[in-house]
């Protein structure tokens, strides 16, 4: 991929915490995307040398790549995301998590329906432990999953490995066109939005200091209240989530913040891109 001097059509914002092996898999996939008119921002909630080394290696690959860091002082993902929004150079922002490897047509799928007043969200195939380990140590190529014939042949193995949401690994433009308007909620690791729409709701609410709700349910509610249409790109914007033990439960404080937000009926948060 040759870096372009033109304004990128999209900015890919990758939320990262410590996992440099998964980040390398993601960056490899971004090098093989079906489109190349995008920039990449690695939004790190921390300052880890292994992440920095990984990014330095890929700086030479041709990706338009920016690395943002902040002190690791608890869960501050929403702060990191708002910093990435401010640093972005495009009007179309695509958000993914650092443990979710995108399909090679992932960016193209999100771009297909991009525009002001439109947010797109997909889903992810949640891989089991053994397949995830093979991807991480490069004994299994991502192409075994992105190619539909080999994916179908591999599906029983995935099932035995306790993969979840196997239908979310099916790439089908036909299914995508049939379900594009089917109601679906935003998934924080797989959604895209117009920057002006995110500015309108004042970005991510930085009051959320624990995982869950703040990166997706809250954003979904506030964008919808602001009149944004949510498009379903489940069968075209595909991700492969690498297995890891779930490290958290639902935060009671997050629930309280979200309930207060809905009661207020105010779609613009007060502690976001701008502090009010």
Image: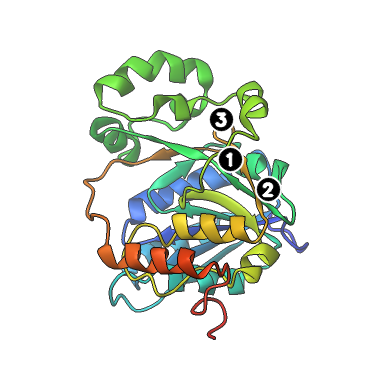
Viewer-proximal residue among 214 and 234: 214
Q: Is residue 109 visible?
A: yes
Q: Nearer the viewer, residue 52 or 180?
A: 180
- Percent across and percent down for residue 64 are 62, 61
Quick one: SS at disc 3?
Answer: loop
In three-dimensional space, the C-alpha distance between marks 3 and 1, rounded to whole angstroms, equals 10 Å
Residue wearing tag 2: 36
Is residue 216 at all visible to an observer of this figure?
no
Outermost residue, bottom direction?
Answer: 276
Q: CA distance from mark 3 to mark 2?
A: 21 Å
Quadrant where the C terminus is found in the figure: bottom right
Front disc: 3 or 2: 3
Q: Is residue 66 left or right of residue 57?
A: right
Task: Please give left or right for residue 10 compared with residue 264 in the image.
Answer: right
Q: Earlier in the sequence, mark 3 or mark 1?
A: 1
> Badge 1 is on which residue?
106
What x and y, as percent, mark residue 264? 50, 70
Q: Secondary structure at mark 2?
A: loop
| Within-10-Å neighbours for mark 2: few <14, some 14–19, many 20+ | many
Instruction: Count every numbered label the image shows and give the total.
Output: 3
Q: Is residue 240 above or below residue 19?
A: above
Name above or below for residue 151 compared with residue 36: above
Q: Residues within 10 Å of mark 3 (few under 14, many from 20)?
A: many
Name the colouring of the figure. rainbow
Examine the rendered structure and indicate whether residue 168 appears above or below residue 27. Answer: above
**Residue bearing the label numbered 3:** 235
Q: CA distance from mark 2 to mark 1?
A: 11 Å
Where residue 227 sits, quadrant-wise, is bottom right
């Amino acid at each position: 991929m040759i870096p372009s001097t033109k304004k990128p059509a999209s900015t890919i914002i990758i939320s990262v915490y410590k996992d440099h092996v998964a980040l390398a898999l993601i960056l490899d996939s971004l090098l093989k995307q079906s489109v190349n008119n995008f920039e990449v921002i690695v939004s790190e909630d921390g300052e880890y040398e292994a992440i920095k080394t990984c990014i330095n290696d890929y700086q030479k690959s041709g990706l338009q790549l920016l690395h943002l860091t902040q002190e690791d002082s608890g869960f501050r993902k929403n702060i990191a995301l708002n910093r990435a929004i401010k640093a972005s150079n495009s009007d179309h922002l695509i958000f993914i998590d650092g443990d979710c490897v995108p399909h090679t047509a992932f960016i193209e799928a999100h771009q297909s329906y991009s525009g002001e007043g439109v947010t797109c969200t997909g889903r992810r195939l949640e891989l089991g432990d053994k397949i995830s380990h093979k991807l991480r140590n490069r004994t299994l190529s991502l192409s075994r999953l992105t190619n539909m014939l080999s994916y179908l042949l591999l599906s029983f193995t995935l099932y035995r490995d306790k993969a979840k949401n196997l239908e979310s690994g099916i790439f089908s433009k036909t299914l995508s066109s049939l379900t594009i308007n089917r109601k679906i909620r935003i998934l924080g690791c797989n959604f895209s939005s117009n920057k002006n729409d995110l500015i309108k709701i004042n970005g991510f609410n930085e009051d959320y200091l624990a995982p869950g709700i703040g990166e997706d349910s809250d954003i979904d509610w506030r964008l919808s209240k602001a009149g944004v249409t949510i498009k379903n790109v489940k069968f075209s914007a595909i991700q492969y989530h690498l297995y890891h033990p779930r490290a958290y439960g639902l935060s009671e404080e997050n629930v309280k913040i979200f309930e207060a937000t809905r009661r207020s009926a105010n779609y613009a948060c007060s502690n976001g891109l701008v502090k009010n």
